[in-house]
Image (cartoon, grey):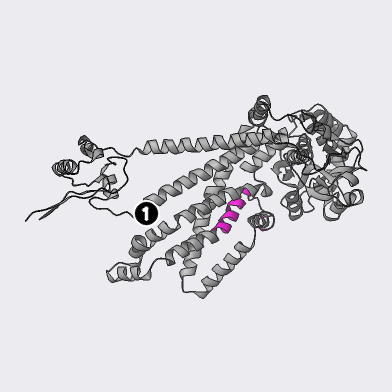
Amino acid sequence: MTGVMGIGRHRLSDKIDPAAAIIWAFTFNHKEYTMIGHIHRKRKVEKNDIRKSRTRGILLICAVMLGLMMLMTACSQKQSSSDEQIRSIEELAEKADTVAQPSDFNLDSELEKICPDAELEFIDNYQMGTIALENGQIDAYIIGKLEISLLLKADDDDSLVELDEDFAVFECALGLCSSTPVRNYESRVNEIITGFIEDGTIEEMKERWIINGCDELPTLSVPVDPEYTLKVVTYGATKPYSYYEGSELVGFDVELAYRVAYALNCDIELYTAEYPSMYLGTSTGKYDMISANLYVTGERTENMTFSVPYDTARIGVLVRNEEKQNSSAFTFDDIKNSFYKSLVENDRWQMILSGFGVTLILTVFGFLLANIIGILYCAAMLSRSRVLHGIAGVYSRIMQGMPIVVVLLILFYVVFGNTDVSGIIVSIIGFGLNGGVSAGQLFYNGVTGVDKGQKEAAYALGFSKFQTFCGITFPQAARRSVTVYFSNLIALMKGTSIVGYVAVVDLTRAGNLIQNSTYEAFFPLIVVAVIYFILATALICLANSINKKLAPKRVGPGTDAAAKKRGWSRWGSDKKSVPVKTTEKN
C-alpha cells in the first residue's frame, strides 16, 4: 500500500491528513514548516484588497502622469526658430518660415503674394495656435483682430505681440441653405438683416457682446405658432461670437440666429460643428443657416449663398515677442488659476461630465452594434451560400478601405442629410458598421481555430450542434479572443474623439470648447487625457480578470487550483517545489 501525503508546491490538498503532515514536518526538519499551526490555518484570498491595490495603482499612475505633464509644461523652454523680431507684414517674407491660419480664412492667395517661401499650416484652435507660436513651431498666426485682443489679454507674460497693419478685411454674413422650406427664405433673411442694421440692433449687439463682454442672452419674444424649426449651426468655441457659458450656448452669433429665426416666425435648433462640416451640412440641407462670424470670400460665393453683410472683420497678425521668450515657467498660482477658469468657473466641469457621458454612450452602444453586426458577418462567412460570402466580403472591403471619420461624414451629411437623426445615433451606427468587421473577423477566426476533431468527437458522443458549440467551440474561442476583443473595445472608445465633425459634443469636443472659451489649454487637455486613460486602464484590468477566469486550470489533489479553491495559501516564501514523502507498506 502506498500512502501519499498530498503536499505539493507549498499547498495543502483538499484531503490532507494532519497526522501525516506532522510526521512530514519532523522528518524533513524544514525550517519554514516546523510551525504546525500554519497547517490548519486557512487564509482566503482577499479580493477586496486586490481591488483596492489596483485602484491605488491607477490613481498613482494618474498622479504621476499629471505631475510629468505639469513638469514638462513648467520646465519647457520657449524656443523660436528665429531670434529676429518681426515688426511689420513686410518682414514676414524675410523672417517667417512657417505661417498659420484657421482653415476657414482662405488667405492662401494673399499669403502667396506676401510670403511666397513660407510654409502654410492650418490651426483652428486659437489656444493651440498661440502655444505653437510661443514654442517656435510657427512664426506668425493670422487671425481676427478681436481674437488677438482677447489672446493678448490672457497672455500674462507678454510673450506675444500684434503687428500694427491689417492683413485683410472681410465682410461677415450668414450662410444660407437654398433648399430650406421657408417661404421666400433668402429675401426675407436679407430684409431682416437690413432692418437690424438700420434700427441699430446690430450695433447694440456688438456693444453688449464685444465691447461690454456680456455672458447672457437677452429675453426675446418667441413665436406663438412657429411655421418651421430652423436648424442653425455655429462653431461654439469662439468668444464672444459663439461659446458655452456653463452648459448654455451664448454669444453674438447665437443671439443673431435667435433674432433672425423669430423674425421668420420659426423655432430654432442650434448645432455646433467644425467649419468644414458647416459648409458640407448647409450644402446637403442638414443645416438651414450658418451663424458663425462667417467671412465672405470669392471662393465661397461660388459654392454658397450668403445673406447681406452685417459687419466687417479686420484680420491681424500675431507674432512672438522675442524679448520676452525667456520668461519664467508656471507657478502654483498660475496652475490654480488655470484649474479654476477651466473647470470651476461657470460650472464648466459640467461640460466635461456631459461629454464623458456622451463618450460612454457612444462606446457602449457602438460596441453592442458592432458585436451584432460581427455575429452576422461570422455567420455569413461560415455559411455555404456564395451570396452571403460575397455580401460579407464587399462589406468588409468597404469598411476597411475608408477612415471612420469619412464614414461618419457620409452617414450624417449624405445618408441622413435630410432627416432629423441626431449625430449621436449616426455616430453609433458608424462605429457599429466600422467595428463590425473587426468583431466579425475575430469571431470567425476564433470559431474556425478550434480543432475539427473535437467537434467530430462531440458529435460521435451524441452532442447536438448547439451543445457542441456552447460546450466545446465557444469556450475555446472565447479564451483565444478575449484580449483582442477588449483591444477593439478600447480602440473604439478612443476613436469616439472624432465625433465633433458630426455636431456631437463628446469628451474631446468639450475640452476643445473649454480651451477656446477660456484660452486655457493645460487643464482641459489634462482632464480629457486622464479620463481616457482611466477608462482604458479599467477595460484592460477587466480583460485581464476575464482572461484569468477563462484560463484552463488543472484541478486535483496537490495542485494550486485545488488549494486555492479550498482557501489554503502558501506556507512560506520559498517558491521551490516541496518534495513529497512516500511511505510504502507491505
Q: Is residue 184 visible?
A: no
Position of 32 compared to 504: left or right?
left
In which quadrant of the rendered image does the C terminus lie?
A: bottom left
**Label 1 residue SS:** loop
Task: Say above or below: 561 vs 199.
Answer: below
Assess whether residue 330 is covered by the magenta stretch. Answer: no
Q: Amino acid at mark 1?
A: Ala
Assess whether residue 418 is covered by the magenta stretch. Answer: yes
Q: Which residue is mark 1?
A: 551
Q: Position of residue 19 (x, y in %)?
A: 13, 42
Front residue (pair 101, 327): 327
Q: Position of residue 215 (x, y in %)?
A: 74, 29
Q: Which residues are magenta?
A: 413-435
Front residue (pair 359, 162): 162
Q: Residue at x 46, y 69 (%)?
A: 382
Q: Position of residue 290 (x, y in %)?
A: 77, 45
Q: Residue at x 18, y 47 (%)?
A: 15
